[in-house]
Image: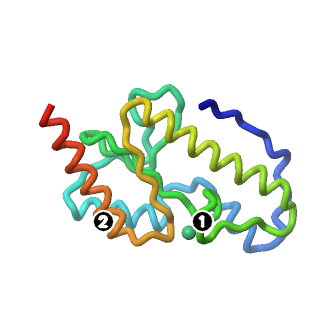
Amino acid sequence: MTYEYVDPGPTPRAASPATAKVMRSTRRRDTGPELRLRRALHRRGLRYLVDTTPPGTNKRRRADVLLRGPRIAVFVDGCFWHSCPQHAHLPKRNREWWRRKLDGVVRRDRDTDAELTAAGWAIVRVWEHEDPEAAADRIARMARDRLGEKRGR
Ligand SMILES: [Zn+2]
């Protein structure tokens, strides 16, 4: 699978304060959902790197949280930018531009998943609307399983 970047064209001016707020928040580090997940992982005894490119990959894709031992890359995906099935929406103004833009984000996500999977990383994507405790449980279980498999070899 190859990922081709499709330029959606020049960025339109935000049509409303709400849209402007969403646009400003793109790829911001240390968002609330990320911090809550990190705290929940830390409480479970997991240690991780933050905003790091997983070793062994060629593309410079950064994982929000990286667990090196079990080789798990975690992405906390914003509902708007990553088109969560529950909260995705296209702004009414500049609709076509937004469709191209948001489609591009999703295609890049899938390309990142393929790239990291090929390099031996497990991918966990957590929606910003998800309960961070449940997500941390899921990641902790996966870490245990993957470490167990390693030792069993
Ligand atoms: Zn959502």
Say if disc 1 is inside 8 Å of ligand 1: yes
Q: Is residue 92 above or below residue 153?
A: below
Q: Is residue 55 above or below residue 82?
A: above
Disc marking residue 40: 2
From mark 1 to mark 2, how far is it between C-alphas? 24 Å
Q: Looking at numbered disc 1 in the image, what kind of residue is underneath it?
A: Pro
Q: How many marks?
A: 2
Could you say where residue 133 lies in the image, as x and y percent from the top left? 33, 70
Q: Nearer the viewer, residue 21 or 123?
A: 123
Q: Nearer the viewer, residue 87 or 32?
A: 87
Could you say where residue 108 lies in the image, as x and y percent from the top left? 62, 42
- Of the four image quadrants, the one with ligand 1 is bottom right
Look at mark 1 in the image and give the residue it sits on: 85
Quadrant holding the N terminus:
top right
Q: Looking at numbered disc 2 in the image, what kind of residue is underneath it?
A: Ala
Say if disc 2 is inside 8 Å of ligand 1: no
> Badge 1: how crowded within 10 Å, few (<14), some, or many (20+)?
few
Q: Which residue shows up at 43% across the image and 36% down it?
A: 117
Q: Is residue 3 left or right of residue 52?
A: right
Q: Which residue shows up at 46% across the image and 52% down it?
A: 75
> Badge 2: how crowded within 10 Å, few (<14), some, or many (20+)?
some
Q: Is residue 5 above or below residue 41?
A: above
Depth check, mark 1 against mark 2: the one in front is: 1
Quadrant assignment, res 109 = top right
Quadrant assignment, res 116 = top left
Q: Is residue 67 left or right of residue 89?
A: left
Quadrant holding the C terminus:
top left
Could you say where residue 13 lies in the image, as x and y percent from the top left? 85, 60
User: Callout 2: helix, strand or loop?
Assistant: helix
Q: Are marks 1 and 2 in contact (CB under 8 Å)?
A: no
Q: Which residue shows up at 23% across the image and 54% down it?
A: 46
